[in-house]
């Protein structure tokens, strides 16, 4: 959490929560192909290993604010897992917890699909992509 993430009420602003989800997603799956320089290899290099011309796009976010996430001068705790894996898309689930109390603050889901940059068409997940997701797929929320 950053000082600038706090709103006038002293808790992390809802827009910054989406940024926290993005940072957790990139830490787990790597940055999309192209931006920046190589860094630490993510646990599941899913985004960085897509073919040239493939975009990893968020189709939908669903966010439930269970309680406010107060600003702390330490990182929030984010648990991340894969939910439903379909033919051409999958869900990423998040649980954001207060790093001091351990209380649940945010439950969220991002629905993601790979899209062909040239045509704008959704691409089916490859067997290799599904295989990478399998160890992190949970059928019920923790």
Image: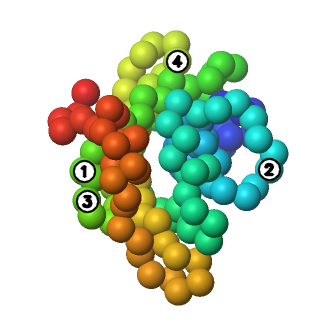
Foreground disc of the pair 2, 4:
2
Residue in front for this viewpoint, 14 or 38 = 38
In the structure shown, which secondary structural element does the residue marked by tag 2 occupy? loop
> What residue sits 66% from the left and 38% below the top?
6
Name the residue that disc number 1 marks: 84
Q: Is residue 118 left or right of residue 140?
A: right
Quick one: which residue is furthest to the bottom in this view? 119
Q: CA distance from mark 1 to mark 4?
A: 28 Å
> Residue 77, how many percent across, how many down?
51, 24
Taking 76 as reference, is 81 above or below it?
below
Q: Identify the mark nearer the N-term, 3 or 2.
A: 2
Q: Which mark is residue 99?
A: 4
Name the residue that disc number 2 marks: 36
In the structure shown, which secondary structural element does the residue marked by tag 4 occupy? loop
Q: CA distance from mark 2 to mark 4?
A: 29 Å
Foreground disc of the pair 3, 1:
3
The crowd level at tag 3 (other Cα within 10 Å; few <14, some 14-19, many 20+) is few
Q: CA distance from mark 3 to mark 2?
A: 30 Å
Q: Which mark is residue 60?
A: none
> What residue sits 56% from the left and 67% below the top?
55
Answer whether labels 3 and 4 touch (C-beta < 8 Å): no
Q: Is residue 77 left or right of residue 36?
A: left
Residue 75 seen in render: yes
Taking 128 as reference, is 111 above or below it?
below
Answer whether labels 3 and 1 touch (C-beta < 8 Å): yes
Q: Identify the mark nearer the N-term, 3 or 4.
A: 3
Name the residue that disc number 3 marks: 86
How many labels were placed on the picture? Answer: 4
In the structure shown, which secondary structural element does the residue marked by tag 1 occupy? strand
Quick one: which residue is furthest to the front in this view? 127
Residue in front for this viewpoint, 43 or 68 = 43
């Amino acid at each position: 959490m950053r000082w600038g993430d706090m709103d006038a009420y002293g808790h992390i602003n809802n827009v910054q929560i989406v940024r926290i989800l993005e940072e957790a997603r990139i830490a787990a799956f790597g940055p999309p192909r192209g931006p920046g320089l190589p860094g630490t290899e993510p646990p599941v290099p899913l985004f960085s290993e897509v073919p040239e011309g493939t975009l990893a796009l968020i189709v939908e976010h669903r966010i439930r604010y269970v309680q406010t996430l107060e600003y702390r001068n330490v990182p929030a705790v984010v648990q991340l897992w894969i939910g439903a894996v379909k033919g051409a898309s999958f869900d990423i689930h998040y649980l954001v917890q207060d790093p001091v109390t351990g209380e649940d603050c945010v439950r969220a889901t991002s629905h993601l699909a790979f899209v062909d940059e040239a045509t704008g068409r959704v691409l089916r997940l490859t067997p290799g992509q599904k295989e990478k997701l399998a160890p992190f797929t949970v059928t019920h929320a923790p």
